[in-house]
Image: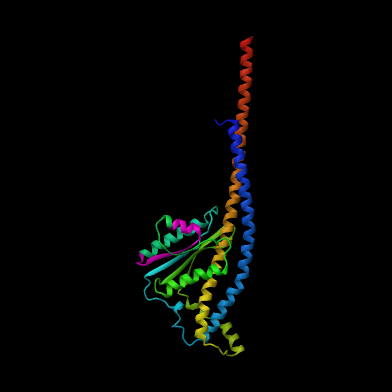
Amino acid sequence: MASVQDLKRRVRSVRNTRKITKAMELVASARLRRAQTRIEAMRPYAETMRELIAGVGRSASSVRGLPLLQQREEVKTVAIVPLTGDRGLAGPFNAQILRRAFALERELRAEGAEVRFVVVGKKGRSTLAFRGYEVAGEFVGFTDRPGYEDAQAIAHRAGELFTEGEVDRVILLYNAYVSPLVQRVTEQDVLPISADILETDEEERRDDALRGDFIFEPEPEEILARLLPVYMETQIYRALLESAASEQGARMSAMRNASKNAGDLIDTLTLQMNRARQAEITQEILEVVGGAEALS
């Protein structure tokens, strides 16, 4: 049985750990609120970008020449872009993304396609390096607070691989933020860009008819060629924001559970310490009584 002093040291150590986990929970909570605000601010921009592309697409005579819309007849190589974090201590946040990425890799290889990875986050990079994977691109150091320039860099690399024919499809994997307790693994095709974004509903067509025809300068096809890369950057940026909010939510939840477990452990150790102290006191009393009886 552990001594009273050993139990005191363990209680002190667990209390110090609980202080750290509580502080990390508060920091994650504050960062989560900021991440939620950024997502809400991003949504109108993303929606407006989609409407703009749809409006220009309706006026374009042909979009067959746009490289980012080209559907390959045979998909030989697929790029997987998993969005992980730069740090741990976030519960299943990183593990569930990597688990889905490797499962998707097995599915694609079973279909006869080659797989390449463009990894985001230090955790994903270290896992792939440990397993001996060669990556086609890596982006780290910004996952807790991503900027639009980070999305541009990722989109540029993905677009480069696609337009040069090194890959025929690009899949983005990220944790979509639902709540601090729930982060849903989401799989999104970013390349080739779906032609569905050029389609509009009946209400939008009526609005265009009321506004009349537009005169485009330069031609709609050229404008669309410039807008599509920006649309892809917007989609990736939105995924980065969702992933950042999910990471903070997962970390806040994990640290809260760790603080609770530390409290339970302190209670258990305190009970053991009291029992050990009582046993020592009882032993001392018995020794005193025994000594008195021996002298008498």
Residue projecting furthest to the left: 112
Q: Is residue 78 magenta?
A: no
Image colouring: rainbow
> Does residue 243 lie above or below 163 as drawn?
above
How far across and how far down the image is residue 141, in percent?
A: 54, 61
Image height check: is 241 above or below 27? below
Residue 116 in magenta stretch: yes
Residue 9 sits above or below residue 147 on the image: above
Q: Which residues are magenta?
A: 110-128
Hey, which quadrant is residue 217 in on the image?
Answer: bottom right
Spot occupied by residue 212 in the image (x, y as percentages of width and height): 60, 90
Work out whether residue 205 or residue 72 is closer to the camera in this orientation and state it.
72
Is residue 229 at all visible to an observer of this figure? yes
In the image, residue 241 lies at what x, y percent? 57, 65
> Could you say which is closer to the camera, residue 26 or residue 278?
26
Q: Quadrant of the C terminus?
A: top right
